[in-house]
Amino acid sequence: QVQLVESGGGLVQAGGSLRLSCAASGSILSINTMGWYHQAPGKTRELVATITSGGNTNYVDSVKGRFTISRDNTKNTVYLQMNGLKPEDTGVYYCNFKSPLPLGLTNNYWGQGTQVTVSS
Protein backbone atom coordinates (compact mmCIF):
# COMPACT_ATOMS: atom_id res chain seq x y z
CA GLN A 1 0.00 0.00 0.00
CA VAL A 2 1.03 3.55 -0.72
CA GLN A 3 -0.34 6.59 1.07
CA LEU A 4 -0.33 10.01 -0.57
CA VAL A 5 -0.74 13.26 1.35
CA GLU A 6 -1.23 16.46 -0.63
CA SER A 7 -0.84 20.05 0.48
CA GLY A 8 -0.52 23.52 -0.94
CA GLY A 9 -3.93 24.28 -2.41
CA GLY A 10 -5.77 27.49 -1.76
CA LEU A 11 -7.35 30.63 -3.18
CA VAL A 12 -5.36 32.82 -5.52
CA GLN A 13 -6.08 35.61 -7.99
CA ALA A 14 -5.69 35.06 -11.70
CA GLY A 15 -2.04 35.37 -12.67
CA GLY A 16 -0.89 34.21 -9.27
CA SER A 17 1.08 31.14 -8.24
CA LEU A 18 0.68 28.11 -6.02
CA ARG A 19 2.91 25.16 -5.24
CA LEU A 20 1.35 21.78 -4.56
CA SER A 21 3.19 19.02 -2.72
CA CYS A 22 2.45 15.33 -2.43
CA ALA A 23 4.35 13.07 -0.06
CA ALA A 24 4.24 9.33 -0.62
CA SER A 25 4.78 6.74 2.08
CA GLY A 26 4.44 2.99 2.42
CA SER A 27 5.54 0.30 0.00
CA ILE A 28 7.26 2.49 -2.57
CA LEU A 29 9.08 0.76 -5.39
CA SER A 30 12.06 2.58 -6.85
CA ILE A 31 10.57 2.54 -10.35
CA ASN A 32 7.40 4.60 -10.39
CA THR A 33 5.58 7.51 -11.93
CA MET A 34 3.99 10.28 -9.92
CA GLY A 35 1.64 12.85 -11.30
CA TRP A 36 -1.07 15.43 -10.84
CA TYR A 37 -4.62 15.32 -12.15
CA HIS A 38 -7.20 18.08 -12.21
CA GLN A 39 -10.93 17.75 -11.74
CA ALA A 40 -12.86 20.89 -12.55
CA PRO A 41 -16.37 21.31 -11.10
CA GLY A 42 -18.79 19.02 -12.93
CA LYS A 43 -16.09 17.50 -15.10
CA THR A 44 -14.03 14.34 -15.19
CA ARG A 45 -10.55 14.03 -13.75
CA GLU A 46 -7.85 14.86 -16.30
CA LEU A 47 -4.11 14.53 -16.46
CA VAL A 48 -2.04 17.65 -15.75
CA ALA A 49 1.52 16.37 -15.56
CA THR A 50 3.57 13.29 -14.71
CA ILE A 51 7.16 12.63 -13.78
CA THR A 52 8.94 9.28 -13.70
CA SER A 53 11.40 8.19 -11.07
CA GLY A 54 14.05 8.86 -13.71
CA GLY A 55 12.91 12.45 -14.12
CA ASN A 56 11.08 12.27 -17.44
CA THR A 57 8.16 14.69 -17.52
CA ASN A 58 4.95 14.96 -19.47
CA TYR A 59 2.46 17.85 -19.51
CA VAL A 60 -0.97 18.47 -20.94
CA ASP A 61 -0.78 21.23 -23.56
CA SER A 62 -2.90 23.68 -21.55
CA VAL A 63 -0.30 23.97 -18.76
CA LYS A 64 2.92 23.89 -20.76
CA GLY A 65 5.01 26.92 -19.96
CA ARG A 66 2.99 27.67 -16.81
CA PHE A 67 3.26 24.58 -14.61
CA THR A 68 6.37 22.66 -13.62
CA ILE A 69 6.38 19.21 -12.07
CA SER A 70 9.38 18.05 -10.06
CA ARG A 71 10.21 15.45 -7.47
CA ASP A 72 12.58 14.70 -4.63
CA ASN A 73 13.20 10.98 -4.62
CA THR A 74 14.93 11.17 -1.24
CA LYS A 75 11.66 12.41 0.25
CA ASN A 76 9.30 10.49 -2.07
CA THR A 77 7.64 13.81 -2.77
CA VAL A 78 6.33 15.32 -5.99
CA TYR A 79 5.68 19.02 -6.51
CA LEU A 80 3.61 21.05 -8.93
CA GLN A 81 4.63 24.67 -9.32
CA MET A 82 1.72 26.51 -10.88
CA ASN A 83 2.37 29.97 -12.30
CA GLY A 84 0.13 32.22 -14.36
CA LEU A 85 -2.97 30.61 -12.90
CA LYS A 86 -6.24 31.06 -14.76
CA PRO A 87 -9.83 30.70 -13.54
CA GLU A 88 -10.14 27.52 -15.61
CA ASP A 89 -7.42 25.97 -13.44
CA THR A 90 -9.91 25.95 -10.58
CA GLY A 91 -10.77 22.54 -9.21
CA VAL A 92 -9.46 19.69 -7.12
CA TYR A 93 -5.94 18.51 -7.81
CA TYR A 94 -5.19 14.87 -7.11
CA CYS A 95 -1.79 13.29 -6.67
CA ASN A 96 -1.27 9.93 -8.35
CA PHE A 97 1.31 7.20 -7.86
CA LYS A 98 1.84 4.32 -10.28
CA SER A 99 4.36 1.50 -10.20
CA PRO A 100 4.65 -1.59 -12.39
CA LEU A 101 3.78 -5.08 -11.19
CA PRO A 102 4.48 -8.44 -12.78
CA LEU A 103 2.30 -9.65 -15.64
CA GLY A 104 1.79 -6.11 -16.93
CA LEU A 105 -0.27 -5.00 -13.95
CA THR A 106 0.06 -1.59 -12.31
CA ASN A 107 -0.20 -0.33 -8.78
CA ASN A 108 -2.31 2.82 -8.85
CA TYR A 109 -2.93 5.08 -5.85
CA TRP A 110 -4.63 8.45 -5.37
CA GLY A 111 -4.36 11.20 -2.81
CA GLN A 112 -7.37 12.79 -1.19
CA GLY A 113 -7.16 15.90 -3.36
CA THR A 114 -6.44 19.54 -2.66
CA GLN A 115 -8.68 22.43 -3.73
CA VAL A 116 -7.33 25.19 -5.95
CA THR A 117 -9.53 28.20 -6.59
CA VAL A 118 -8.47 30.93 -9.00
CA SER A 119 -10.51 34.11 -8.90
CA SER A 120 -10.81 36.38 -11.91
Image (spheres, grey):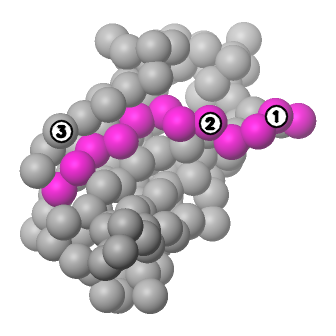
Q: CA distance from mark 1 to mark 3?
A: 28 Å
* Mark 3 crowdedness (10 Å alpha carbons): few <14, some 14-19, many ≥20: few
Residue range highlighted in magenta: 42-53
Q: Which residue is mark 1?
A: 43
Q: Quadrant of residue 118?
A: top right
Q: Name the kind of residue labelled 2 in the image.
A: Glu
Q: Which residue is mark 3?
A: 56
Q: Nearer the viewer, residue 83 or 61?
A: 61
Name the side, left or right, on which 29 lies relative to 46: left
Residue plotted at (22% across, 77% down): 29
Q: CA distance from mark 2 to mark 3?
A: 19 Å
Q: Is residue 115 magenta?
A: no
Name the side, left or right, on which 14 lies relative to 4: right
The answer to whether marks 2 and 1 mark residues whose Cβ atoms lie closer than 8 Å is yes
Question: Looking at the rendered structure, which numbered label has been put on residue 3?
Answer: none
Name the side, left or right, on which 26 lies relative to 48: left
Q: Quadrant of the C terminus?
A: top right
Q: Nearer the viewer, residue 58 or 92?
A: 58
Q: Is residue 83 visible?
A: no
The answer to whether marks 1 and 3 mark residues whose Cβ atoms lie closer than 8 Å is no
Q: Name the kind of residue labelled 1 in the image.
A: Lys
Q: Name the kind of residue labelled 3 in the image.
A: Asn
- In the image, residue 56 lies at what x, y percent? 18, 39
The answer to whether marks 2 and 3 mark residues whose Cβ atoms lie closer than 8 Å is no
Q: Quadrant of the N terminus?
A: bottom left
- In the image, residue 35 lies at what x, y percent? 40, 48
Q: Which residue is mark 2?
A: 46
- In the image, residue 105 lies at what x, y percent? 42, 70
Q: Is residue 53 above or below residue 16?
A: below
Q: Quadrant of residue 24?
A: bottom left
Residue plotted at (63% across, 24% down): 89
